Image: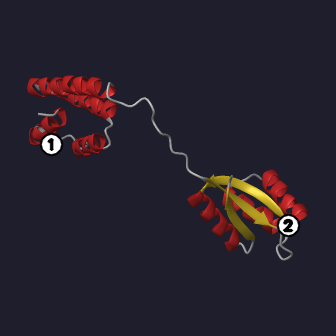
C-alpha cells in the first residue's frame, strides 16, 4: 500500500480525533495536491506536521502512523530520485515588448501620468519613456510575458494612447 493511500485511510480517524483542528481539511487537500503534482518533499513535510500535532495531542497511534508515512515517503523518494532523467527541459515563456507610439493628440503630461498609472513607474522613468516616444516616434515601455503585455497595452489604449505589443527576438 502506498504511503499516500495510508494517509487517506486514516483521514476519517484524524478528522474524528482532531475535530477541533480547523486546518485539518486544508492539510488533506494540500496532501492530495502535493501527491498529484509529485511534490514529495512537501508531502514529507506535511507528514512531519501531522506527527507534531499527534505528539502535541499525545496520540501514539497517530505518531506511529506519521512515522510510517514519513519512512515510506523517504524510501519512495530515494527510489524515484534514481529514476529521474538528468536532462530536464526548462520552458521559457516568450517575452513581449509593450511599445508606446507618439501621437499628436495626447499631452506630454497625460502620457506621463498614464505610464505612471499603468506600469507604476516613477515620474522620471515615465517622462523618459514619453520623451523617447515623442522624439523617435516609438518607445519601449516594458518587456514581459504575453498576458501582461496585452493587458498593459490595453490599459494604455484606454487612456487614448497608441500602444502595441510585439514579441522579442
Q: What residue lies at 28% left-to-right and 23% top-to-bottom? A: 78
Say which of 124 and 93 sits in front.
93
Label annotation for residue 125: none
- Residue wearing tag 2: 108
Crowding at mark 1 (Cα within 10 Å: few <14, some 14-19, many 20+)? few
| Closest to the observer, 80 or 19 | 80
Task: Mark 1 and mark 2 in contact? Answer it, CB < 8 Å.
Answer: no
Is residue 52 or residue 3 the one in the foreground? 3
Q: CA distance from mark 1 to mark 2?
A: 62 Å
Q: Nearer the viewer, mark 1 or mark 2?
A: 2
Seen in the image, is 157 located left or right of residue 28? right
Q: Residue at x 84, y 62 (%)?
A: 133
> For numbered disc 2, what is the local secondary structure?
helix
Which residue is at 63% across, 60% downward? 149
At which x and y percent is residue 16? 9, 41
Numbered label attached to residue 19: 1
Rendered location of residue 140, percent (x, y) = 76, 56
| Callout 1: SS | loop
Amino acid at each position: 500500500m502506498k504511503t499516500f493511500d495510508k494517509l487517506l485511510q486514516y483521514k476519517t480517524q484524524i478528522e474524528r480525533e482532531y475535530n477541533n483542528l480547523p486546518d485539518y481539511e486544508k492539510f488533506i487537500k494540500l496532501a492530495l495536491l502535493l501527491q498529484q503534482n509529485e511534490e514529495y518533499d512537501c508531502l514529507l513535510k506535511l507528514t512531519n506536521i501531522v506527527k507534531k500535532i499527534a505528539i502535541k495531542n499525545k496520540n501514539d497511534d497517530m505518531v506511529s502512523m506519521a512515522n510510517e508515512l514519513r519512512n515510506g515517503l523517504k524510501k519512495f523518494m530515494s527510489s524515484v530520485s534514481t529514476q529521474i532523467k538528468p536532462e530536464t527541459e526548462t520552458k521559457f515563456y516568450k517575452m513581449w515588448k509593450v511599445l508606446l507610439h507618439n501621437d499628436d493628440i495626447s499631452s506630454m503630461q497625460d502620457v506621463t501620468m498614464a505610464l505612471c498609472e499603468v506600469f507604476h513607474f516613477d515620474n522620471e522613468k515615465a517622462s523618459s519613456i514619453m520623451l523617447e516616444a515623442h522624439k523617435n516616434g516609438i518607445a519601449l515601455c516594458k518587456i514581459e510575458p504575453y498576458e501582461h503585455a496585452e493587458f498593459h497595452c490595453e490599459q494604455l489604449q484606454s487612456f487614448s494612447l497608441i500602444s502595441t505589443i510585439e514579441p522579442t527576438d
